[in-house]
Image: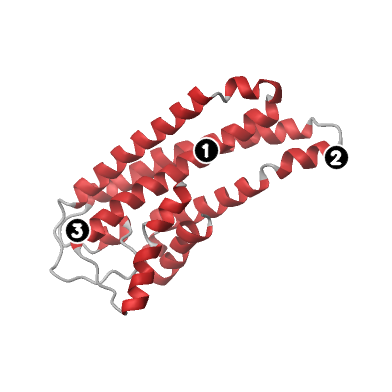
Amino acid sequence: FIDICVTSTTIPNIVINIQTQSKVITYAGCITQMYFFIIFSGLDIYLLSVMAYDRFVAICHPLQYMVIMNPQLCGLLLLVSCIANILHSLLQTSIMLQLSFCREVEISHFFCELNHMIQLACSDTFLNDTIIYVSAVLLAGGPLAGILCSYTKIISSIHRISSAQGKYKAFSTCVSHLLVVSLFYCTVLGVYLSSTALRNSRASAIASVMYTVVTP
């Protein structure tokens, strides 16, 4: 559902642009798109880490799985993810509203991505840049650390399985998740933390397609 929401913030607008041959978006429309994109892409990051923890419990503690991953815990993890990302999105969009822009600007991207919008501002963006880097470390680095920790324990547990069939079965449950995590994190971190991506709009757009369209 979250993956559908991520693509729904960008793809319908792209389709309309292609059909109408118009690439104009209003300031209010751009801020709205940015607000919902930050929420849903952030939720994607959190849920990928929750899924890694789910795989860890299933492989390392199979007999206790139903007890540990009970509906109350799942609901709490989802609620915390939603609240954290709504607050983060409100913070990012509210400080974005403090920036001044020229009357007409050209966004060299297929949607209103946060770091590209900041680059187009006419006023000082030091606070915005600082918050982007801090939030990238906390809101993306924290879940990534959880994913790496979970998979370290999963790999250690798989090595202790004696049969080759058992190892294959355990590892096969993680392959799709690992693939999505690799694509998602490599491209997101490349777009938001790399200065090269900011200078090369084409490379940034291609990387953005990977985590907004391909991984969902």
Q: CA distance from mark 2 to mark 3?
A: 56 Å
Which is more N-terminal, label 1 or label 3?
Answer: 3
Image x and y of residue 184, in percent? 51, 52
Q: Residue under circle 2?
A: 164
Comparing marks 3 and 1, which lies closer to the viewer? 3
Q: Say few, some or many: other residues with alpha carbon within 10 Å of mark 1 (under 14 / 14 to 19 / 20 or more).
A: many
Under tag 1, what secondary structure? helix
Q: Which residue is mark 3?
A: 28
The amino acid at mark 2 is: Ala
Secondary element under disc 3, as helix, strand or loop, is helix
Residue most toward the bottom?
A: 21
Q: Going by the image, does 170 lie left or right of 17? A: right
Q: Where does the image place residue 47, in percent across and percent down from the top left?
A: 49, 40
Taking the image as shown, residue 125 lies to the left or right of residue 76, namely left
Please name the residue shown 66% across and 30% down the image: 58
Q: Position of residue 154 (x, y in %)?
A: 68, 34
- Would residue 28 appear left or right of 143 to someone viewing this image? left
Q: Residue 80's quadrant in the figure?
A: top left
Res. 49 mark: 1
Mark 2 vs mark 3: give the one in front: 3
Q: Is residue 56 above or below residue 192?
A: above
90 vs 170, left or right, is left
The reply to whether residue 110 is in sight is: no
Q: Earlier in the sequence, mark 2 or mark 3?
A: 3
Kind of residue at badge 1: Ser
